[in-house]
Structures are given as structure tokens and as C-alpha cells.
Amino acid sequence: METLAMHISNGIIDGPVAAVFAAVAVAAMTLGLLRGRRDLDDRLAPMAGLVAAFIFAVQMLNFPIFTAGVSGHLLGGALAAMLVGPWVGALCVAVVLVVQALVFGDGGVAMLGLNITNMAVFGTAAAYLLIALLLRVLPRTPTGLGVTAFVSALVSVVVASMGFVFQYWLGGTTDLGGNLGGLAGTMAGAHLLIGIGEGLITATTVVTVAKVRPDLVYALRGLRPASAPTVPAVGGVR
């Protein structure tokens, strides 16, 4: 099924719905730009560039999902949220999606608002909400950070895929004969497997960065417990 592709191609969703979500994407990116400017500093600005470049490079690597006849790749919402925060992270993912659509034809240009909404907005927001929750429950050790990264990445991929199902319900161009539930189940199953791969990549990357430079992991700096000491721990993740 072509509709299993996370990057929506032109013609899959009708024009009015695509226009609505284009407006949603523009509004979300404008808010992200305004809020993200508050977070930018000497550490976050270069890190944002590195994160965007890393997501772009890793998205070129596809792994097959044999049960669905499609391939999956890193979406990057959870990775970006953990390393540079939700606002800048969403912008990083959006920039990657724009370049992919305009230069490589990965996803329709007319559907760019839909793809940005699903992967940069829904995916990153869902990931960061989970990150904020889990880092208040789990210990801030490499293991706790890895579990947080894995779970948030997996859930963010499934949430992004459900965004497509919602959009297809609003304006899909092919009549499914009332089988929207079947589409949702197929999308969830395929992207659950994709999410496992994304979770492993995200956890490995975040833990590696945290072991070397914990000060570069936004989630560790921006989500400190209320009782956390003001002096940072030395030699690893707190």
C-alpha cells in the first residue's frame, strides 16, 4: 500500500485538507522559531545544526519492514527533542523534510504541510511529553536515559503515523469502504516495528552524547528535578 509511506505523496490527501495542515505547519513552525530563540545559546545553536545534519544523513538509511512491504527510517523527533528541545527540535525535523521534498522528491511538495505536521509537530511533541514524564520517574543514569529515548522514539513514530490516518479520514482521495480502522491498524503495526528501529538508534545516540558531554543534552539541562543540586555532576549523566 502506497499510503503506508510516512512521507505523503501528492494526491493522497485532497487539496483543502492539505491547505489546512499547511497553515497548521506554518503556525507551529512560527511558534517554534519564536520560542526556540529563547533557548539558543553557544551550545544549542551549533548542536541544532549537527542534529539536523545527523537526522538528514540517517534518514537516507532504510531498513525493511517485511510484514508490510515497506521500509522505515529514522524520523528524528525524539532524538531532536532530547538533544535540542521541542521547539528547536521541531524546526530541525521540518528543515530536513523541506530539503527532502524539494531536492529529493521524498514526499509531495503540496503535501509538505501534512508531513511537517505529522513528523515535526506531532512526533516531536509526543516524544517530548514522554521525555518530560519519564525523566521525572526514571533515574538519570545511562540506562534511564536510554529507556527514555527508546520509549519516546517508539511512541512518537506511532503517533506520527496516526496523524496520517486522521488526515486521511478528513480528506483521503481513495474510498476505503469504511475500513479506516484497517488502515489505522496496518499503519500502527508497521510503524511500531519502525519505531523499534528508531528507538534503538535514538537511545544509542543520546546515551553516547550524554556520556561524553551531558551538558549538550537538552533534556538533562531543561528538565531538572525541583530538588536537583545546582552543581552539575562530574563524569557522566546525573
Image (cartoon, helix red, strand yellow):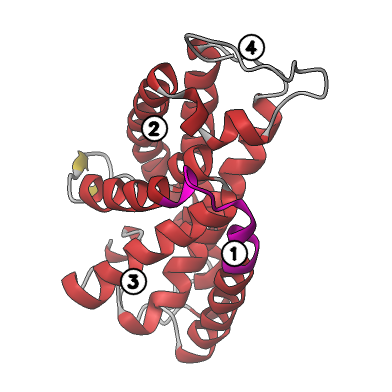
Q: Residue at x 31, y 60 (%)?
A: 5
Dot 3: element: helix
Using the image, determine if residue 82 lies above or below residue 163. above
Whether residue 69 is visible, yes or no, is no
Magenta stretch encompasses residue 35: yes
Snapshot quadrant of residue 13: bottom left
Q: Which residues lie in the magenta part?
A: 33-45
**Image disc number at residue 32:** 1
Q: Amino acid at mark 3?
A: Val
Dot 4: element: loop
Of the image marks 1 and 3, the number of the one nearer the N terminus: 1
Which residue has dot 2 on it? 202
Snapshot quadrant of residue 139: top right
**Magenta part, dominant SS:** helix
**Image disc number at residue 98:** 3
Of the image marks 2 and 1, the number of the one nearer the N terminus: 1
* 10 Å crowding of disc 1: few (<14), some (14-19), many (20+): some
Q: Amino acid at mark 1?
A: Gly
Which residue has dot 4 on it? 139
Of the image marks 2 and 4, the number of the one nearer the N terminus: 4
The quadrant in which the C terminus is found is: top right
Of circles 1 and 3, the one toward us is: 1
